[in-house]
Amino acid sequence: MLSIFLVFGAIFLFCISGLQAYLFSPQSQTGQKITVVLMMLGAFAGISGVALVIASPDAVSMNIPWTLPWSRFSVKIDHLGCVFLLPVFIVPALGSIYAIGYWNQKLHPENGQRLGAFFGLLAGSMALLVIAHDSVLFMIAWEVMAISAFFAATVEDDSLQVRHAGLVYLIATHIGTMFLLAMFALWRYTTGSFELNPMQSDSSAVAGTLFILAVIGFGFKAGLMPLHVWLPGAHANAPSHVSAVMSAVMLKMGIYGIVRMTSLFPSVELWWGGMLVIIGAVTGIAGIAFAIGQQDIKRILAYSSIENIGIILLGLGCALVGKYYGSVSIMAIALGGTLLHVWNHSIFKSLLFMNAGAVIHAVHSRDIEMMGGLGKRMPLTMLLFVTGAVAICALPPLNGFISEWLIYIGFFQTLDVGNTRSFTAIPLGVVALAAIGPLAIACFVKMLGTVFLGNERSSGSGHAHDPSLSMLIPMSALVALCLFIGLFPIIPLNIIRNAVFVWIGQSALELPLSMTISLGWISWISAALLLSAAGLLLLFKNKLWRKTDKKIETWSCGYSAPTRKMQYSGSSFGDSIVKLLRFMLQPSDHEPKNSLYFPKKSSFKTGVPDTVLDKLVLPVFHLAGHYFPMVRVFQRGHIHMYVLYILIIVLVLFVLGR
Amino acid sequence: MIEIALHVLLLLVMPPFLLGVINKTKAWFGGRKGVPFLQVYYDIFKLFRKGMVFSVTTTWIFRVGPLVTITVLLIAGLLIPMGSFNAPISFTGDLILFAYLFGLSRFFTTAAALDTGSSFEGMGAAREVTFACFSEPALFFAFLVLAKISGTLSLTPMLHGPLNEYSAIVAAPLVLIAIGVFIVLLAESCRIPVDDPNTHLELTMIHEVMVLDHSGPLFGVITYASSIKLFVLSALLLHIMLPFQLDQVWLNWILFVVEMVGIAVIIGVTESVMARLQLLHIPYLLISALLFCAFGFILLIR
């Protein structure tokens, strides 16, 4: 019981953390500092509550009646929920520290309070969402989360771009909510209760419908291709610590929904897993391909979040296939990798978004083509970025590799090694992962090279410098987590293991022994890799060779007047991949028109817009706006009219329902 | 213990010799006498005695690039079995680590190239990351085939093949992935028809142009590392092409060395009889490698 009260305390502290700032003057930073204290207290309470649950073998729950009809105030913290609760407590708390330097109340008196208030509410509602055991409470928390994310992400609503991105987000999230309402209605119709207890009867048709509704409804939030349309714009235009929380934690709430719902069905079909593997492969490959084409530093990260959601779905799909075949080993390994990737992505993506925020703070632009050479002015920021980039590319020795490794093993096991029959075409998930890997490397090398390496491309970066401690501390904490999970993967996997068994519905099984041995090897090799690379660097730094190092300009192949503008730009770096994937990315090139004899001043513009949003969704909405103006008759703008509509609909339902 | 010592010794000493063999083969085809077999060793030693020149544009990434690459390739070399002997490090799932170690080296090599701020090096880096998008999935298709045939997920038993005889059904898939892996080997170790290691013509090269600004000992490290890469990938291919072994344990070491030299000769012959492909056509070659491996997989699980 104590654990539940601790988590309630955390939710309460999170929710009020920003509100108290309204008591102070908008020009004073006192409120913001109290916010950090409250968030830290909340995180501490929440993490201790979660730790109590993790230490105990059983879930804790609370079930009391409340005034809403047909449902009870029912919460439950089980091991699966704990896995999703930890990022909810850690990332926003770090984000609030970051906000002191990034969104200083003194410099933003007009919207700082609003940002703080909705930031806390967003974090609190996500924690409530994870512990909700009743779908009515779940939907309440879901909506509070969606709305507070909207208000937190659109604080700079004097800009048209921000308002546009916010509107797209608001529409997308409510279409998702619509599917979720349908799903929970069907859930209650089938099970007779709004409570999220495992389904008893086994009717596969209904289960299949529920599954599809869950994938679509939660998919809008998680950002599956092609339901991702809101994601790049909203992430790019939000303040960086809000982007960090949205990407690192809020997208995972969509994943949590799918994981939770799939754990409630007594049996699964083969096509469930197959469908998730296909969606995951498409989301992963298309997500990272779009990321390569972007020039906005935060849009790159947003698309890379889509890619990681794809990887998570691949793992979940593999686990579902394992469930269909009743293979505990596949389920344990694939779902373990999936849940670990949920953690890992929370860690390195919030690190990278905060890092992007530090860069934007320094150069006042989101366009990477205006940056360059920042590594010499912001050495610490670059070091943090390189760590995050290596982690997100799933390269050893950091944490991303561990989770992708587990998902790979899960897919390899679907080969059913040793037997003659394979599990259909599911092992091809290996190839999907192998295609995502090099694309991710291309994407993040492009980012590293264009932002931090080479020469400055504009004068804007002239006085850039490393950010203040309040921004460096949260990032360093996240880097430490990347290293910790990368070097000691067994410890987090022991926590995740219990969550996996909640999902499987069996208790207390060990990870297959060979996995533990392999992970031990990987730890040793990772440590050896780090140490030997560091050792070699020291050797070379300390002038092992007595010859002195010379410093000159970069060799320009004999050309006598190279300029900084002649560097390879980010777009040219990504161009060869973008051209190869032209059929999917649809890049928009505006070539200059040169008249032959008297060339005029001309310009060249290139970019990769979001194909689904620009070529499909917006045209459909415009067409709808064009052909359905008669519906506007109902939209009078008078609230009493809308109440009248509700009355009429209720009456109609009364008549029909009899 | 002796096996591990020999493995490490061969891994450290033999790789530059393979480059020497390739160069000798190419010289022989060209009707020239060619540089000595040991020329690459001389080059590396010479480079290690020189000073280094750094561009003022560069940061620590530029120095770290080659050092990470060599570390990573040596670790990858410890994962791959030589001939009939076991690799020093072998565990379930090491094949994924093997592939991702190459990814790590690619990350730092291309980042170091971009660190110079030169558009030539940028071009090389862009090509390198693009072509990897084909060669890596091809490699994983080959891994799928090998895992299915051998029934394990660890490189050593996987490359040593099944305990009993190969069944006839695996012959075609093995031939197909051998072709695919050979193309990947040519691409990854920058040989003709993908890349020409002998010229520095910036507009067409991939690997050589990325390291234009490295000099002295760091360039020596790069040369050494690229020979190790060739060695490790050849050892991988060797198992797919020639899974033979002899009764005498000691003869197997000699057999391994001879077979590796044989692969170097094959690479040399390939380089001699082919022209470098037009840059725009290289993706087609790599896609064909991907298709060879993919069809191998389909044949196997049909």
Image (tube, coloured by chain):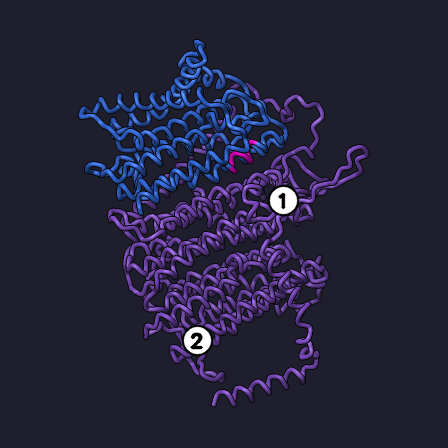
Chain colours: A purple, B blue
Which amino acid does the dot numbered 2 rest on?
A: Leu
Q: Residue furthest top?
A: B33
Q: Is residue A647 left or right of residue B106?
A: right
* Disc sitting over residue A466 in the figure: 1
Q: Is residue A570 left or right of residue A432?
A: right
**Residue hosting label 2:** A186
Dot 1 surroundings within 10 Å: few (below 14), some, or many (20 or more)? many
Which one is nearer the viewer's eye here, A296 or B185? Answer: B185
Which one is nearer the viewer's eye here, B301 or B259? Answer: B301
* Disc sitting over residue A534 in the figure: none
SS under mark 1:
loop
Dot 2 surroundings within 10 Å: few (below 14), some, or many (20 or more)? some
Q: Is residue A31 above or below residue B271?
A: below
Which one is nearer the viewer's eye here, A172 or A493? Answer: A172
Mark 1, chain letter? Answer: A
Q: Residue furthest left?
A: B247
Which amino acid does the dot numbered 1 rest on?
A: Asp
Residues at discs 1 and 2 both on one chain: yes
Residue A650: x percent and y percent?
A: 55, 86
Residue B160: x percent and y percent?
A: 26, 35
The quarter in which the N terminus of chain A is drawn is bottom left
Mark 2, chain letter? Answer: A
Q: Is residue B254 magenta?
A: no
Q: Which residues are magenta?
A: B124-130
Q: Is residue B129 magenta?
A: yes
